Image (spheres, rainbow, N blue to C red):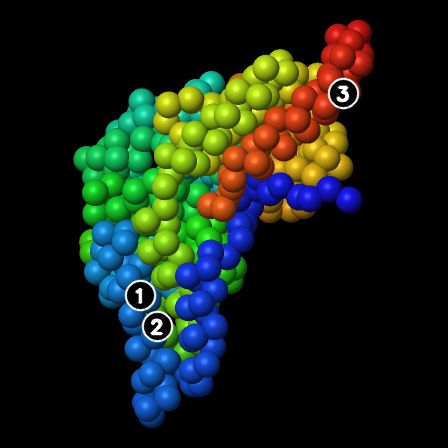
Amino acid sequence: MHETHYFDANASQKLCPAARDAILLAFEAVGNPSSVHRPGRTVRRIMEDARDVIANGFGLQSQDLVFTSGGTEADATAIHAMSVGRRLIISAIEHDAVRSAATGAVIVPVGRNGIADMEALETLLSDGNPSLVCLMLANNETGVVQPVEQAAALCRRYGALLHVDAVQAAGRIPVRLDLLGAHSLAISSHKLGGPAGVGALLLAPDAPFTAPLVSGGGQERGRRGGTPPVALIAGFAAAVLAGQAADQQRIATLRDAAERAALACGAVVCGDPEHRLPNTSCIALPGVAAGVQVIALDLEGIAVSAGAACSSGKVQTSHVLQAMGLGTLAGEAIRVSLPWNVMEADIDAFAIAYRRVADRLRPTLVQGHARS
Ligand code: PLP
């Protein structure tokens, strides 16, 4: 039995020690943060301290942060609350969390480098129709960082709103809502080393909020009903602090080493090499289906994913890579996403396993591919 080397941080990653400690401590407290008695107030204090930390980390005031169950709910809430009377415009590479909430949206194309086309966005906005634009900060499959500041400037010039899915960017590159100029931002705890089951919607002071997705008992200033999971929220805040202190250059250096090992086996790296998250690489092996690579690497003790597998568990051809015009490569790319606790030994193991898998699968399948 192989030891597993985990390269699927963009799906989820190990809880960081600070988050674990904060969760265990907060679980000791009893009560509902809405209760007025002393235990309720104690729990509320834990939650509000965490809110301050997270809001501060992303450049906004505490009252502008709404806790949700995760990134999916934060995206859906933003679209629900800000799209009334507005046309929806989304980039071609948005996550299903946005795509499924934005039915009927007009699509902004991306180039072969995976970057959304700002000229196309401006052409759409210039008709002056009230719009809500959704543009993610970093793509979950390629790691490519999008020109969100430029999109925000365009939106503000034409009177449109901008929602940014920052689920993959948060904790990996600096993210500040005030500096980006967007109207709202979605983040998720488990992508940055916190627990799953909690996330947040961050709202700019001038963001409209027509109606909550879940109204319930009016928690979160009427913007999200339901008792908040205080222990998870405490862990989320601890993970945000740990992420701010993390050495992303170390991660990028290890990611580059993994990439070099794959390139030496005939692989192709997809997406803009400069504007990328430090932990993510999208690597295609021509002639070998992504699903086959994932299984072969898994048998070697290497955990990676393909396409949008993080959301469904199924391996589908990636809509992101298709939108980039990568043709057959779109079905032959795996996502290698390094977690906060990755070590050099993991990269050495990846290099050995990738070589074995490429040597075994590539020649026969490439020939078969060429003949068919
Ligand atoms: N947005 C992006 C870009 C993602 O990668 C994901 C998860 O993979 C989500 C949203 C959904 O986040 P959550 O799992 O917290 O619901």
Q: Residues within 10 Å of mark 3 (few under 14, many from 20)?
A: some
- Disc on res. 329: none
Q: Is residue 250 above or below residue 23?
A: above
In terms of secondary structure, where does tag 2 sit?
Answer: helix
Q: Position of residue 118 (x, y in %)?
A: 32, 26
The amino acid type of the residue labelled 3 equals: Leu
In terms of secondary structure, where does tag 1 sit?
Answer: helix
Horizontal side of 2 relative to 145 (left or right) equals: right
- Rounded to the nearest angstrom, the CA distance separating label 3 from label 1 is 49 Å
The amino acid type of the residue labelled 2 equals: Met
The amino acid type of the residue labelled 1 equals: Arg
Q: Residues within 10 Å of mark 1 (few under 14, many from 20)?
A: many
Horizontal side of 344 relative to 359 (left or right) equals: left
Q: Position of residue 80 (x, y in %)?
A: 41, 55
Q: Residue at x 80, y 14 (%)?
A: 364
Label 1–label 2 contact, CB within 8 A: yes
Q: Residue furthest bottom?
A: 37
Q: Is residue 93 visible?
A: no
Name the residue that disc number 2 marks. Answer: 47
Q: Residue at x 23, y 52 (%)?
A: 59
- Disc on res. 51: 1
Name the residue that disc number 3 marks. Answer: 361
